[in-house]
Image: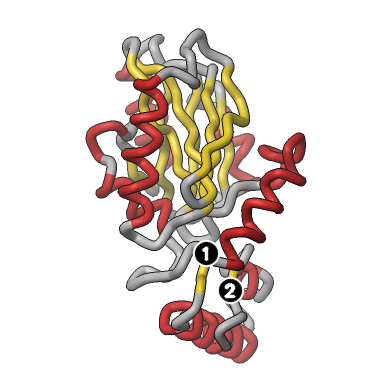
Amino acid sequence: MDDTSIFVRHPYEILYQVRQNDKETHFIAQEYFSSLWAVCSLFDGKVINRPNILAWQHDQQSKNQLKSIQIQDIWFSNINDFQINWANVGDEIIEAHIEETVTWKRVIIKQPNSLIEKGKDIGLQSNYRAILASSAEYIIDMCIGGKYFSLLNETQYDTNCEEHISLIDKIYYNMSQIGLGFFAVIFSIVKGEKKIVRILSNPPFHLYSHIEDVVHQCLLKELQK
């Protein structure tokens, strides 16, 4: 097994593909998922994005690791409460990133009342978390092992400067402590400061499709370590 490495791209898909009302199929899917979780956790060799006590919920754990530079979440189950919360914040909010906490489906909305319209994409009978962003301009960086790539910069900030590299180093160190080695960081500017909107432990392909060969080569090198 010395030459074996593991990288699970979509660990939760096995659960998403079964219906909750099909109890037998859902039970089998949970058993498969639990086995995959155990194998990846206990495997002695290289595992990219190794699961831990919360499985692959690194995105959630990052909130505790980097709380001082994260935009804080709003948790809600009543859409009306969320709309009131947004309205109370004022005009400084440009958009909201909303995540349904069972399937982790996500939407971005520009107006509080448009959540009803977008709700069909994430389900309306559930619990949610949201981030209110004061800018629709983003910086997106990708980390693979100790290497960083700038995927997007819609702001005036220099992502090659020492300050930004130091920030990415800090984020990578903290994420590596919870087993994360391949991820993307989305920043927004809040009152003149860079704040983390999200850390994506399973970055969608469209974010890095323009440098896919470089990214895949780096992943292969990491798996061969």
* Closer to the camera in the image, 117 or 54: 54
Q: Residue at x 63, y 35 (%)?
A: 117
Q: Quadrant of residue 68?
A: top left
The numbered mark, 2 or 1, whose residue comes first in the sequence reads 2
Per the rendering, the mark at residue 6 is: 2
Per the rendering, the mark at residue 48 is: 1
* Closer to the camera in the image, 194 or 169: 169
* Closer to the camera in the image, 219 or 76: 219
Looking at the rendered structure, the kind of residue marked 2 is Ile
Looking at the rendered structure, the kind of residue marked 1 is Ile
Instruction: Estimate the x, y position of residue 40 in percent, counting from the top left.
Output: 49, 78
Q: Secondary structure at mark 1?
A: strand
Whether residue 198 is situated above or below residue 22 in the rendered picture: above
The alpha-carbon separation of the residues under discs 2 and 1 comes to 6 Å
Quadrant holding the N terminus: bottom right
* Closer to the camera in the image, 37 or 130: 37
Instruction: Estimate the x, y position of residue 70 in percent, counting from the top left.
Output: 32, 34
